[in-house]
Image: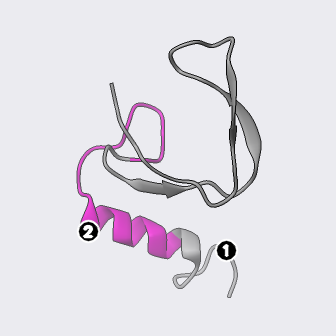
Amino acid sequence: MNERGPLSCLHLNKLLQSSLNPGPLAKGLPFREGDKVLQRKNEMVKVADDPEIMEMVVNGDLGIVLVS
């Protein structure tokens, strides 16, 4: 299987997203409000409340997309 075929993870994720969470896409993102997400690599990110503070987000962290 490749990344672009009808049974690829990318294609299956889009099909599941549209049936399980049919709302509109978030502004400029491939996500919808309420989508569940999984962090796939470790990285330092800025904290939304204080951009001077960095926080480690690690592989395997789970979250839910919130749109403001």
In the rendered structure, the answer to whether residue 15 lies left or right of residue 45 reads: left
For residue 15, above or below residue 63: below
Q: Is residue 26 magenta?
A: yes
In the rendered structure, the answer to whether residue 2 lies left or right of residue 31 reads: right
Residue 1, picture quadrant: bottom right
**The residue stretch that appears in magenta:** 11-31
Q: Position of residue 52 (x, y in %)?
A: 69, 11
> Could you tell me which secondary element the residue under label 2 belongs to?
helix
At label 1, which amino acid type do we have? Glu
Cα distance between the residues tagged 2 and 1: 21 Å
Q: Position of residue 21 (x, y in %)?
A: 26, 58
> Could you tell me which secondary element the residue under label 1 belongs to?
loop
Q: Which residue is mark 2?
A: 19
* Crowd tier of the residue under label 2, counting other residues whose Cα lies within 10 Å: few below 14, some 14–19, many 20 or above: few
In this rendering, the label closer to the viewer, 2 or 1: 2
Residue beneath the point at 37% across and 37% down: 26
Residue beneath the point at 30% across and 63% down: 18
In the rendered structure, the answer to whether residue 56 lies left or right of residue 35 reads: right
- Using the image as rendered, state which of residue 65 and residue 19 is in the foreground: 65
Q: Which mark is residue 3?
A: 1
Whether residues under marks 2 and 1 lie with C-beta atoms below 8 angstroms apart, the answer is no
* Crowd tier of the residue under label 1, counting other residues whose Cα lies within 10 Å: few below 14, some 14–19, many 20 or above: few
| Colour theme | one colour
At label 2, which amino acid type do we have? Ser
Residue beneath the point at 69% across and 57% down: 59
- Using the image as rendered, state which of residue 11 and residue 56 is in the foreground: 56
Q: Position of residue 48 (x, y in %)?
A: 53, 20
Q: Earlier in the sequence, mark 2 or mark 1?
A: 1
